[in-house]
Image: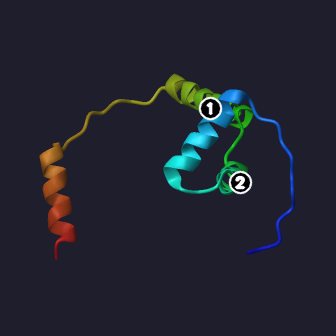
């Protein structure tokens, strides 16, 4: 096992209850679960980053909705499209 560094942290009572429950259910130590949660959490975006990304996507969609695009209607049906794709890729 890799060298470990001791850390002391404070958690809320309800977090301790959940941690103990998950430890019992999984058979992993509380420390192993904390290490796993840290590893997963490092790669997640924080709430502020997710909110900013959503706001940017929403602004983009709102701008696109304002565009005047001629609606010509489609000349094909879904069944025709599926049939064409089936013929093309089943060779």
Where residue 49 sits in the image (x, y, percent)?
A: 72, 37
Picture quadrant where residue 47 is located? top right
Q: Nearer the viewer, mark 1 or mark 2?
A: 2
Observer-nearest of 91 and 77? 91
Q: Mark 1 = which residue?
A: 54
Crowding near pointer 2: few (<14 within 10 Å), some, many (20+)? few
Camera-nearest residue between 40 and 75: 40
Q: Quadrant of the N terminus?
A: bottom right
Mark number for residue 78? none
Q: Is residue 2 above or below residue 73?
A: below
The chosen color scheme is rainbow
Q: Is residue 26 above or below residue 70?
A: below
Q: Are marks 1 and 2 in contact (CB under 8 Å)?
A: no
Query: Residue at horizontal 17%, vertical 59%?
Result: 84
8 displayed left or right of 14? right
Report which residue position mark 2 lands on: 31
**What percent of the width, then of the height, locates residue 31?**
71, 54
The image shows residue 36, relative to residue 16, as above or below, that is below
Which residue is more in the foreground, 68 or 18? 18
Residue at 18% over, 44% down: 76
The image quarter in which residue 39 lies: bottom right
Q: Quadrant of the C terminus?
A: bottom left
Q: Marks 1 and 2, Cα distance to the nearest angstrom?
A: 34 Å
């Amino acid at each position: 096992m890799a060298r470990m560094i001791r850390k002391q942290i404070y958690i809320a009572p309800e977090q301790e209850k959940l941690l103990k429950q998950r430890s019992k259910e999984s058979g992993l130590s509380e420390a192993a679960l904390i290490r796993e949660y840290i590893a997963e959490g490092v790669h997640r975006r924080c709430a502020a980053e997710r909110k900013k990304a959503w706001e940017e996507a929403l602004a983009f969609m709102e701008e696109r909705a304002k565009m005047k695009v001629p609606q010509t209607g489609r000349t094909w049906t879904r069944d025709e499209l599926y049939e064409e794709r089936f013929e093309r890729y089943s060779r």
